Amino acid sequence: MNVPVWQPYFPYNALLCRYDEIGTKGKNRFAFEKRLWSELRRRLAALGEFSLIQERGRIFLVSKNPDAHFSPEDLLRLRREAPLIPGLASLSPGFMLEPELPAIESCVLTHFPALHAAFRRHHGDSPCTYAMRCRRSDKGFPMSSQEIEIYFAGKLCRQFPDMSIDLRQAKLQVGLEIRQNLAFVFFERISGAGGLPTGISGNVLALLSGGFDSPVACYQMMRRGCQLNYITFHSSPYTPPATLTKVADLARRLNTLQNPGRLLAVNLLPAQKAIRDLCSSRFRTLLYRRMMLRIASRAAAKLGDKALVTGDNLGQVASQTLENLAVIEEASSLMLIRPLVCADKWQTMKTAEEIGTWQLSSQDVPDSCTVFAPPDPATRTYLSKIKQEEEALDIELLLRQCLQDSCFIDPLDYSETPAELL
Ligand code: ATP
Ligand code: MG
């Protein structure tokens, strides 16, 4: 029952939000519902103020203004937003009514003809199929779900003789929920992002670059209930200011999908210079990465983040062989999560488009990793070899120098505040 493009406009007055996974979490359910509810309220704020009616596995949102209904723009916004709300299985805008047959009948018979007419306009003579799905939790209602479905099938099929019943794949679907204090009629179902509401699993720190992968990795973590802070590395003045504004733009976009997280910018240049001058050029990228993870681990401890997240993908670039990923990971003192490790590039690009980061990532801006990039990067190495290279470095000193040159960037106005991380 996903929203067909030909769906006509209806002046709906309420929303039915469904969640699946979180409904199964036993005594944590209340916390899960509370997170989802506060996230729904934040994300749908432009649609007005809602009161909440909670039922098992469902949340009804009813406009606080009894005369209000959703405008066509509201519905467009809803169709755009809902697929990106973690924890939400699906959502239906619909009509909230008194739980009585005359009210339900009047609603269905008033709106169904417009649905049928829109189908005919769009599909010409192709077969028109119909189904009603009724769920009734109020056992005091005088008819059973099946009796209600048969009752409306009889009425509507008589009124529209071109229509036949198809319970599995009907083109025209009517949904009806009957509860003790309300009935809800709907004609469409918009898929949510699924997963868990953001914030419920705890805080993590994401290594955010200007590429396509790391913003998608961030979104995957949000879908598993994490709240994210971001850390990015630049090499100013070898990288231009645009390196940072690009990442700030990505963080701003990502922050619309969760309670805003903080963006920490760290200048990696002191470490990069030392690596350039003191280590073999073939291992430069790996040594940069290990420094990034060490710095990120320290920052995470200060920010209260429990794990690090990267957009690494197995085999995508030279630094991402199994051997290299293992060598890089060893430098992290925190759990390192790589949500995209097995993702195909097209899948990542598709998600980047859906979450609105593709356009931002596609701008061509230099990345910190390309500073002093070697012509001959190692695709395979061993920890013992890398540790030997690192013996030439005063790692603790370099860590301190980089952390000293770090600041928080406000993604809304690019303003910088020194980050006291030492
Ligand atoms: P992305 O598209 O996310 O940049 P990528 O495919 O270009 O990823 P790499 O450049 O090898 O891959 O980076 C792997 C991961 O390391 C990134 O996804 C990101 O998490 C982290 N990373 C790389 N460069 C930076 C940086 N300058 N600042 C923060 N994190 C970085
Ligand atoms: Mg990159």
Image (cartoon, grey):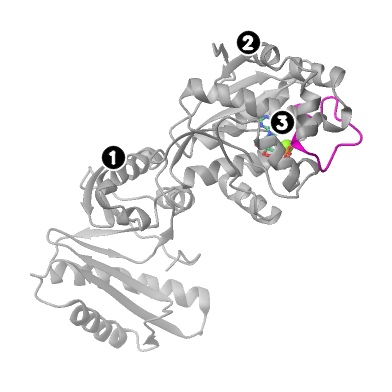
Q: Residue 49 got which mark? A: 1
The kind of residue on which mark 3 rests is Arg
Quadrant in which residue 284 is drawn: top right
The x, y position of residue 210, in whole percent, is: 69, 34
Q: Is mark 2 within 8 Å of ligand 1?
A: no
Residue at the disc numbered 2: 404
What crowding class fits label 3: few (fewer than 14 Cα within 10 Å), some (14-19), or many (20 or more)? some
- Most foreground residue, 102 or 197: 197
For the residues labelled 3 and 2, the Cα–Cα distance comes to: 19 Å
Quadrant in which residue 148 is drawn: bottom left
Q: Which residues are magenta?
A: 367-383
Q: Secondary structure at mark 3?
A: helix
Quadrant in which residue 389 is drawn: top right
Q: Quadrant of ligand 1?
A: top right
The x, y position of residue 84, in whole percent, is: 48, 48
Q: Residue 359 got which mark? A: none
Q: The C terminus appears in which quarter of the rendering?
A: top right
